[in-house]
Image (cartoon, grey):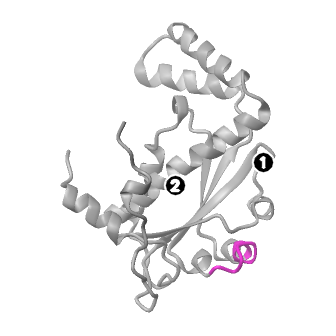
Amino acid sequence: MTVSTDTLLSSLRWRYATKSFDASRKIPAETWDAIEESLVLTPSSFGLQPWKFLVIQDPGVRSNLLAESWRQSQVTDASHFVVLAARTDLTSQDVETWISRMSEVQGAPVEALAPLKGMIEGFAQAMSHEARHAWNMRQCYIALGQLMATAAALGIDTCPMEGLDSKRIKGILKLPSDATVVMGIAVGRRSYNGIVSPRIRLPDSRFIKEV
């Protein structure tokens, strides 16, 4: 399946960090299912998916999150609000779970996957706990980009948000100790009363170089 370059660039140029959402415009279930599937399909290092995506629909919980997000109205006005969390570490059990899943899906004996398991564990163990934590958090930004691009292609607006109190939000959502809130993203339909300023981008020659 291919998409024309004009279609692709048109959707990316249409996208902007929407600050004002129309609370009355909800994302159809079929469209939201596609956005969720794009999160499932997001690539990650070794395919380990060291994250959790929490889709916050409860109005009361959203109201509590609003207070810990600089009272940014996107949290409560957008059709959907997603919190992206990362695991604080990568354990041997995490790798074991992934290898078992790979065996199940690909039909390969677990024993045949032992070299891959050993390589992943060796890579992870060579890093400090802090480095593994940071590595997992960076993976969430891959998922964020995939979600935003998918939503734009479907004509859905988004606003990524790092301006939140991650520790307090972790408490509100009752996340386990081995999870860290990385960011949130509001997903919905823009309010036509919102102001969309001309997009400001530096020339590509400032940061793209062919070698």
Q: Amino acid at mark 2?
A: Leu
Q: Amino acid at mark 1?
A: Pro
- Relative horizontal placement of residue 168, taking residue 75 as reference (left or right): right
What residue did someone put label 2 on? 144
Q: Secondary structure at mark 1?
A: loop
Q: Position of residue 62 (x, y in %)?
A: 66, 73
* Quadrant position of the C terminus in the picture: top left
Foreground pick, 178 / 162 = 162
Residue at point 33%, 68% (across, down): 13
Mark 1, other Cα within 10 Å: few <14 / some 14–19 / many ≥20: few
Give the magenta range: 64-72
What residue did someone put label 1 on? 176
Residue at point 45%, 56% (across, down): 147
Q: Position of residue 35 (x, y in %)?
A: 42, 57
Foreground pick, 106 / 6 = 6
Foreground pick, 132 / 96 = 132
Question: Which mark is on residue 23?
Answer: none
Residue 34 in sight from this viewpoint: no
Mark 2, other Cα within 10 Å: few <14 / some 14–19 / many ≥20: some
Residue at point 52%, 12% (across, down): 113
Earlier residue among tags 2 and 1: 2
- Give above or below for 197 relative to 137: below
Q: Position of residue 194 (x, y in %)?
A: 46, 88
Front disc: 2 or 1? 2
Question: What's the distance in space between the residues labelled 2 and 1, CA to CA?
Answer: 22 Å
- Give above or below for 99 relative to 208: above
Q: Secondary structure at mark 2?
A: helix
